[in-house]
Amino acid sequence: MKTAYAYAKMEESDLEEVILIEQGVFRNPWSEEFFRLILSDRSNWIITLRSERTLLGYGGYHLLKKRPSFLPPAASACGTIHLINIAITPSFQHQGFGTRLIELLFSNAKRNAEYCYLEVRPSNTKAFKFYQHSGFSVIGLIENYYPREKEDAVVMGRTIPGLIH
């Protein structure tokens, strides 16, 4: 049986639950203060995915005002988003909710952007495979991106289908 869900723009009232997921999924979770900063930036679009009252996950992007010079030619000046975070409650992983979050983010972003990039830890093979399965490919490497662990970041990117002008 499939779990019914709905998405909504993340609100400050979601933070307590979001932080619990963040702490359960990431080695170095974002703080409540950082989430508040992210929510206050109008260039960010952050959503939650819920089944009735249960938070299944959240994700979001930042709409860049300028095309970063390190991106490939496929990332034109029309618009680029930086996928800043995506997380699914561990007990709901491997059920398609991460894919659905990306689809929802892309559906919103395609009004203003045609390219998306993200960073992922090389040691996070589960996330790396998920992003590959979602159509992302490796476009670069940022050395020592995660300084606490002295770990690089793999930069992955892909076009966003269906830009609406």
Image (cartoon, rainbow, N blue to C red):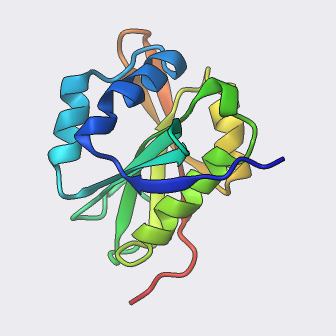
Quadrant where the C terminus lies? bottom left
> Can you give x and y, in whole percent of width and height, for residue 43 in the image?
22, 58
Residue 75 visible in the displayed image:
no
Of 143 and 49, which appears nearest the observer?
Answer: 49
Which corner quadrant of the image does residue 92 belong to? Answer: top right
Residue at screen point 52% across, 17% down: 24
> Can you give x and y, in whole percent of width and height, for residue 89 in the image?
58, 29
Of 32 and 63, which appears nearest the observer?
Answer: 32
Residue lying furthest right: 1
Of 12 and 58, which appears nearest the observer?
Answer: 12
Of 123 and 97, which appears nearest the observer?
Answer: 97
Relative vertical location of residue 11 with respect to residue 147 in this rendering, above or below:
below
Relative vertical location of residue 136 with respect to residue 29 in this rendering, above or below:
below
Is 98 placed left or right of 19 in the picture?
right
Residue 78 visible in the displayed image:
yes
Relative vertical location of residue 75 with respect to residue 4 in this rendering, above or below:
below
> Can you give x and y, in whole percent of width and height, for residue 147 in the image?
35, 15
Residue at screen point 17% across, 50% down: 41
Residue lying furthest front: 52
Q: Total marks drawn?
A: 0
Is 162 placed left or right of 9 in the picture?
right
> Can you give x and y, in whole percent of width and height, for residue 40 in the image?
15, 46
Residue at screen point 51% across, 47% down: 49
